[in-house]
Image: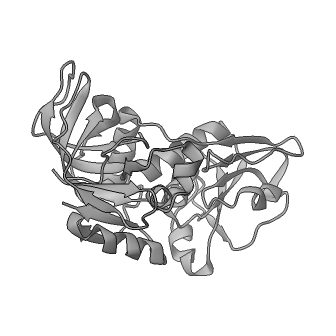
Amino acid sequence: MYALSAVAGSAVPQLAEPPDPTPGVGEVAIDVTAAGINPADAQVLGGMLRDAFGLPNEVGLGWDVSGVISVIGPGVHGLSAGDRVVGLHADLSAPARAHADRVVLAADAVTALPEGLDPVGAASVPLNALTAAQALDLLGPAEGRSLLVTGAAGGVGGYAIALAAAAGWQVSGLARESDRDFVAGITRGDGTPVELVTELREHGYDAVLDAAGLQERALPAVADGGAFVGVFPPAPVPGERGITVGTVSVSPDGPRLADLLRRSASGELAVRVAETFPLAEAAAAYQRFAEGGLRGRVLLVP
């Protein structure tokens, strides 16, 4: 087995050969097809999340994964060896995670790959789509309310505007002018395109989902008594003007992921893959990710 880890003091992911993982009660072992690189991985590698969460000196990397079940642990029902699945590994402190050629996940953190969805591209979905869906949950029902999603052309933001539009929000997306086609290509429930905005409007929205991590800089866009949800749990934004403030901390959720994957397979949610790299070329993949300018995930393929 090969797996990537982040080691304190090194800005380059380390490729190691840990023992093959054995699934315990309620777990499955998955032979990895693809795994995505996300900002949280770069933040662990760079030390920011290591410090914020008090992580050990060496931890595994990788959140979302697609693959084929190779071993079923005791107490697992509804899944079988040979099933194609997609899942989320949310334990930041684990010594080996999704950036590997084999990974162990809780059975309730995975779901079957739906027909029509590319098994490599599916690895771009779990973390971003679940984060967006769970962040919207924190904002409550749409009920005609207005919502601004920052970073609307990014990973979490792209899913958030699509899910919010489908749920009935009067949603607008903060993004660059160059992202207009993507943002306006998503329609609200009344058939109108999602509005692209390139500057924050003070007190302009009932709610803000801050997928870009602007933090305090995005709070002025919320109307008095509105709601704000951020995506950086270690540094919650202090409330003001009666605004309800929350942060989303993504949790594995197999049934919810199944719905999001079905919507991805149907084309309702865009599957965006920027580039793929072999696992053995992980250093180059992380370097490409760090360079930015991507609209879609960088994926590692064992």
Give the residue at x 55% y 76%. 179
Residue 137 image-quadrant placement: top right
Residue 241, how many percent across, how many down? 90, 45
Q: Is residue 134 left or right of residue 13?
A: right
Residue 182, how many percent across, how many down? 50, 71
Q: Quadrant of the C terminus?
A: bottom left
Give the residue at x 69% y 74%. 198
Residue 119 image-quadrant placement: bottom left
Give the residue at x 28% y 38%. 111
Give the residue at x 31% y 61%. 14
Toward the viewer: 8 or 93? 8
Q: Is residue 39 left or right of residue 167?
A: left
| Residue 263 appearing in the image | no
| Residue 132 appearing in the image | yes
Residue 282 image-quadrant placement: bottom left
Residue 230, how many percent across, how many down? 65, 49
Colour scheme of the picture: one colour
- Answer above or below: position of 107 versus 281: above
The mark tally for this picture is 0
Toward the viewer: 21 or 8? 8
Toward the viewer: 19 or 109? 19
- Answer above or below: position of 279 versus 60: below
Toward the viewer: 163 or 234? 234
Judged from this view, the residue extending furthest toward the bottom is 178
Residue 64, how many percent across, how many down? 35, 50
